[in-house]
Image: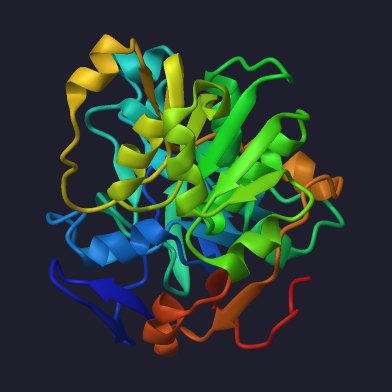
Amino acid sequence: MKGIYFDGRTAAYREDLPMPVPGEGESLIRILYAGVCNTDREVLRGYRPNFQGVMGHEFVGLVEASSDPSWVGRRVVGELNAGCGHCIYCRTGREKHCPERKVIGMDGKDGCFAEYMALATHLLHEVPPGLPLKEALLAEPLAAALEIPKQLHMDPDTRVAVIGDGRLAYLAASVLGLYGMDLTVVGKHPEKLAQFAGMGKTWDLAQARQAFASPDDTFEVVVEASGSPSGLELASGLVRRQGTIVLKSTYAGSVDVDMSRFVVNEITIKGSRCGPFGPALRLLGRGLVKLPPVEFFGLKDWEGAFCSGAFKAGFLVQEREGQYG
């Protein structure tokens, strides 16, 4: 089997990978498309130092065998975290926080940057009829953006800032824009900020730092989606006292910040990662969220995909594009 394998230090394209064998309660999925996430890049930088296996966690595939025969032949996307099923977190609907969970492409479980993958059947979601598979590929990152309003109640009049001008920030801004928020996007790159036209105001870093001195220019909620350690420091200057910072970025390494600022100003810091797939697929299927196209590569050209400057890069795993819609 062809795929991209991480040995704990570096990644390599291989053609000798063993075919996955589904375990109890799992399905065998033929991968059609796979998406590159910034977290995948961070794995190469040491974010998951103990992981060895096939990389990748964003995919669209076709179920070829399953513990539940009704899934066979369906076009699917799937969730990342497979819990043990019996701990306090799994029993209370928090499987993604199971201490023994396996995370595809990152922790104890081969991912989707290969021709086939095995995944727990209960983590699958069927792609709605009529939704192109290349768009369905964005269901996982869109679900992560939808976790923000799921975790945090925000009045539509709330003044919100999103830090970052990349994919994750775009998805967060797209979701928050559906609520009619007073939205400002803060970024470094004028050409990327141009993509946020129509969603709200855009600021460069200089404009953002000017707001530090004026409470009226700060924000009740700041979503940190820059993918950079510097994002938290910027967020701490933009958030109002008794406001909330939502952390979406994941990266290797640590952050050096003045924690007393959060205590004295009574700032709430909310970690936020995986989110609900059902609403993400419905938004995509109804055309309520429009996202730039994905730039596709072959698995063998994985380095080109990881270095791509496109809105999002991914892999066309199937031999013939458009074969499955």
Would residue 27 be seen by someone viewing this image from the given angle?
no
The quadrant the C terminus occupies is bottom right
Q: How is the image coloured?
A: rainbow
Please report the residue visible at 68 percent of the width from the left and 63 percent of the height from the top: 194
Q: Quadrant of residue 131?
A: bottom right
Side (left or right) of 29 relative to 156: left
Please report the residue visible at 19 percent of the width from the left and 42 percent of the height from the top: 255
Q: Quadrant of residue 6?
A: bottom left
The percent position of residue 287, horizontal first and vertical second, equals 85, 50
Q: Is residue 32 above or below residue 231?
A: below
The percent position of residue 97, horizontal first and vertical second, equals 33, 27
The percent position of residue 232, horizontal first and vertical second, equals 33, 39
Q: Quadrant of residue 133?
A: bottom right
The one nearer the camera, 29 or 266, is 266
The quadrant the N terminus occupies is bottom left
Would residue 174 be seen by someone viewing this image from the given angle?
yes
The percent position of residue 320, horizontal first and vertical second, equals 68, 87
Please report the residue visible at 28 percent of the width from the left and 60 percent of the height from the top: 42
The one nearer the camera, 294 or 236, is 236
Side (left or right) of 191 relative to 135: left
Please report the residue visible at 57 percent of the width from the left and 22 percent of the height from the top: 216
Side (left or right) of 270 relative to 157: left
